[in-house]
Amino acid sequence: MAGVSGCSRQRLWIKETLDSILVISLFFLFLALTISSPSLAMSSPLSSDDMALVPAGEFLMGSPIGIDGLPDEQPQRLVYVGAFRIDRYEVTNNAYVRFVLATGHRAPAHANPAFTLWEGNTPIPGIGTHPVVNVSWEDALAYCAWLGKRLPTEAEWEKAARGTDGRRYPWGNEWDFTKANSASYWAGRTIDFQSGADWDAFWIKGEGAKISKEKGIRGEVLTLPVASFPESASPYGLHDMAGNVAEWVQDWYNPNYYKESPLTDPQGPPRGAIKAMRGGSWLKPAVSLRTSDRDWGTMDSRPSGTGFRCAKDAF
């Protein structure tokens, strides 16, 4: 009986050991799947470590009359903005899919299904680190709120992009088409459209159309992974503040707002019909990548060249 009891104890020890190994193996397998699969990941995709602190203070907002400044950027003036935090990177598809899966919010979609970069509730393979596009202002607002954040104001966005020295581009005052994802980058030379006809000639009928078809995602979208141009980061360490995708901001857009806006923490007009965008995109000419450039879109539009990043109060 003692021999049988000893064999039983040995078999029991072996079983318990194998069970422990199996549990540990399954744990590490789940951990690996969680890291690689957004659908298994935790619902909160970003931490405060992904945000830069922009200290309180004044900065030069807008453009002076002349050079390449546009009327809706004038007059240039000193604006005070309180301290805030802002995402270092544009929101990626990997981050946005967690929001969609956790909340049931609608997935990004193009007006033409053939150019939609998502299949069901997940992005197509290979674009996880690209900025999410085909999201409306309302989509962007909902995502930021889910994380306890908000969209930045135009003033916050511009200060984060140009710092306090009034620079024209996030990297300095000199234009360089190799420093940002724009129409110029893809053409290999500076591109500036003087009219809608110039735009059509490049993107619809000409060189840009060919580039999009040959190199674009689904023959259309020319976004790049976020932070593809690390040498072009803003003074506060933010990436892609010029090009890649234009970014929704909090404010209503009014071309005359700068003439009457407050000089302390401007929040934009109290009402309006269209929302402001900043930063330019892969579609845009050189002039649109200046830190002072302003753009706009309807709240429910979901362009292929527009994404966003979030902000929150510093304290």
Image: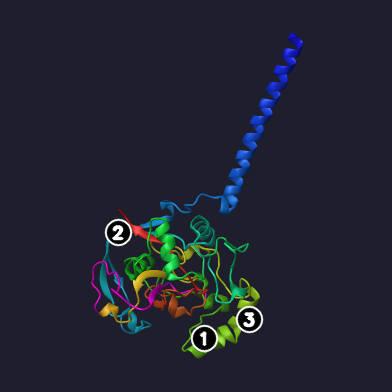
Q: Which segment is the magenta one? A: 260-282
Label 2 secondary element: loop
Residue 281 belongs to the span the image colors magenta: yes
Taken as a whole, is the magenta stretch helix, strand or loop? loop
Residue that mark 1 sits on: 199
Q: Nearer the viewer, residue 15 or 242?
A: 15
Question: Which residue is drawn at the image coordinates 57% and 62% (left, top)?
Answer: 121
Q: Residues within 10 Å of mark 2 (few under 14, many from 20)?
A: some
Residue that mark 2 sits on: 83
Is residue 106 toward the left or the right of residue 299 in the image?
right
Q: CA distance from mark 3 to mark 2?
A: 44 Å
What's the amino acid at mark 1? Answer: Trp
Query: Mark 1 and 3 residues: CB-CB less than 8 Å, in contact?
Result: no
Q: Is residue 123 above or below residue 66?
A: above
Residue 197 belongs to the span the image colors magenta: no
What's the amino acid at mark 3? Answer: Lys
Is residue 94 toward the left or the right of residue 11 in the image?
left
Residue that mark 3 sits on: 210
